[in-house]
Image (spheres, rainbow, N blue to C red):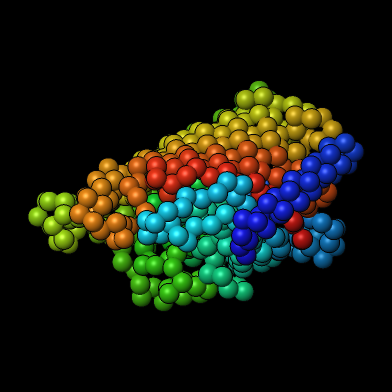
């Protein structure tokens, strides 16, 4: 839903008043219940497993790692009865609102006339089903996992010309249908957690280059995963999935190594192939993605300061176009010839997070995140992305589950893309620029500051501020500031 500028002003005032009133009431006197934080929403389960070192006293017995059991709005005896028998069924809703408080760029250049100042709302309802077949049928170490979602709404960033980083991460990818199938796979855990083998319909980037901490934020440059890791449509990230196989070994308590093989399916983020996600015939497989990742996961100061230090890379076997050169080695934007094709491409990443301070509650403290993603500069749009963030949870003793967050991402566009777009503009072909651009793309920065309020069991409300520098990586677009909020409700 979109609103013109005049309506936005009134809405912004109303939103600010509501946020201020809510903050005042909540911080002053609501007693917090059990922990409910955005690290535990549906979809974070795979990355939670990756981020969980082996227990101190582990045996070689096959066992199923514990499922995510977040608090819910109301106690549910049926859920408790099912979990006791190995069935974990979760339902939640995440809603994200963002409204621009700055006017967009206007002018006679093609594309600018459609820009407007306004607001948008996007959201997702999700269902997760985990089954511990050890408890249910005596199949030691075996579990299955399935997630379906529905998404609605739109995102505000396109109103001011940005197509790279959504202001509301839950927009897109889910098909805008009542039910979108995300993933369903089985996993066998052997030797006391030292070896885990999984296969089925899987979201590769839920296991690789993943962290449950990313979605403490709303903007799409950071939430879900730093956007550079899915620079192409060949890396399947939530809510997209492909057939896949993954194996993870833990040679030491705080070290893991994992790899896998994921068929690349053409159009996994587009409605013509995967609107509902239930297309399983594999007729559109065009190659394979092969990721590998290792990490050190230390826990300092008697278990109060966990950290994760990840290094990874992936290879794509599918041919991709060169972003600058044609088949003869000249700039394609000047010659008009077909772009050169490369038989394979790659991506690499390093990702760190470390809790620096510990406060009162078990999950409280100050955590720092940083990382970098570097893609094949010949074929990528985003040559590299670097990010940094701080999460400060439980700073106020009376609010142990509230979280203050700040995140910043910097994206550098590949040199070939920049040069090709400049060539097109020089020869008067501005209307044919790729990536919905209305000018030359070079770099962009997205920042977010927020405060997540633990309202009651199962409910989180997060007022936030987003700021875009060079939207769509274009210096000819005016910077944009947005106010909004993110809410999460765990129903069961």
- For image coordinates 77% across by 64% down, the residue present is 82
Q: Position of residue 34 (x, y in %)?
A: 81, 44
Q: Residue 348 is drawn in which quadrant?
A: top left
Q: Residue 72 is drawn in which quadrant?
A: bottom right
- For image coordinates 31% across by 54% down, the residue present is 316
**Picture mark count:** 0
- For image coordinates 51% across by 63% down, the residue present is 173
Viewer-proximal residue among 421 and 233: 421
Q: Name the image quarter holding the N terminus.
A: bottom right
Viewer-proximal residue among 248 and 191: 248
Viewer-proximal residue among 361 and 59: 361
- For image coordinates 81% across by 60% down, the residue present is 80
Q: Is 4 displayed left or right of 78 in the figure?
A: left
Q: Position of residue 228 (x, y in %)?
A: 42, 46
Q: Is 8 displayed left or right of 438 in the figure?
A: right
Q: Name the image quarter holding the C terminus.
A: bottom right
Q: Is 331 displayed left or right of 435 in the figure?
A: left
For residue 140, say whether it is visible. no
Q: Where is residue 97 in the image (x, y as percent from the top left)?
A: 65, 54
């Amino acid at each position: 839903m979109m609103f013109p500028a005049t309506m936005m002003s009134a809405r912004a005032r109303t939103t600010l008043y509501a946020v201020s009133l809510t903050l005042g009431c909540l911080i002053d006197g609501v007693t917090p219940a059990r922990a409910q934080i955005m690290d535990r929403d549906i979809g974070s389960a795979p990355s939670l497993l990756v981020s969980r070192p082996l227990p101190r006293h582990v045996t070689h017995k096959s066992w199923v790692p514990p499922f995510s059991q977040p608090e819910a709005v109301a106690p549910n005896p049926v859920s408790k009865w099912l979990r006791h028998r190995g069935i974990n069924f979760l339902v939640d809703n995440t809603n994200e609102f963002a409204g621009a408080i700055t006017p967009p760029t206007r002018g006679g250049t093609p594309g600018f006339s459609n820009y407007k100042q306004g607001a948008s709302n996007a959201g997702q309802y999700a269902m997760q089903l985990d089954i511990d077949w050890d408890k249910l049928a005596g199949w030691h170490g075996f579990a299955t996992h399935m997630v379906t979602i529905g998404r609605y709404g739109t995102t505000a960033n396109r109103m001011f010309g940005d197509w790279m980083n959504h202001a509301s991460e839950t927009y897109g990818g889910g098909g805008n249908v009542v039910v979108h199938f995300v993933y369903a796979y089985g996993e066998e855990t052997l030797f006391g957690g030292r070896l885990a083998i999984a296969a089925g319909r899987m979201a590769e980037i839920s296991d690789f280059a993943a962290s449950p901490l990313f979605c403490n934020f709303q903007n799409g440059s950071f939430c879900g995963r730093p956007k550079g890791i899915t620079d192409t449509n060949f890396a399947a990230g939530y809510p997209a999935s492909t057939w896949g196989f993954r194996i993870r070994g833990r040679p030491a308590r705080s070290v893991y190594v994992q790899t896998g093989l994921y068929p690349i399916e053409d159009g996994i983020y587009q409605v013509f192939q995967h609107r509902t996600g239930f297309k399983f015939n594999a007729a559109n497989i065009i190659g394979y993605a092969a990721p590998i990742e290792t990490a050190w996961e230390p826990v300092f100061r008697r278990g109060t300061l966990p950290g994760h230090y990840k290094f990874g890379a992936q290879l794509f076997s599918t041919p991709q176009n060169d972003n600058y050169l044609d088949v003869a080695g000249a700039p394609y934007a000047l010659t008009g010839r077909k772009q050169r094709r490369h038989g394979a491409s790659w991506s690499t990443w390093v990702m760190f997070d470390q809790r620096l301070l510990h406060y009162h509650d078990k999950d409280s403290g100050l955590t720092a995140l940083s990382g970098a993603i570097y893609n094949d500069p010949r074929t990528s749009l985003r040559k590299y992305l670097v990010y940094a963030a701080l999460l400060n949870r439980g700073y106020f003793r009376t609010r142990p589950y509230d979280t203050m967050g700040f995140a910043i991402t910097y994206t550098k566009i590949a040199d070939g893309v920049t040069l090709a777009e400049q060539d097109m503009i020089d020869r008067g072909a501005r209307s044919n620029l790729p990536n919905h651009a209305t000018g030359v793309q070079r770099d962009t920065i997205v920042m977010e500051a927020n405060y997540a309020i633990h309202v009651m069991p199962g409910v989180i409300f997060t007022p936030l501020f987003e700021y875009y520098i060079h939207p769509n990586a274009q210096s000819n677009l005016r910077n944009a500031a947005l106010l909004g909020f993110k809410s999460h409700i765990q129903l069961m």
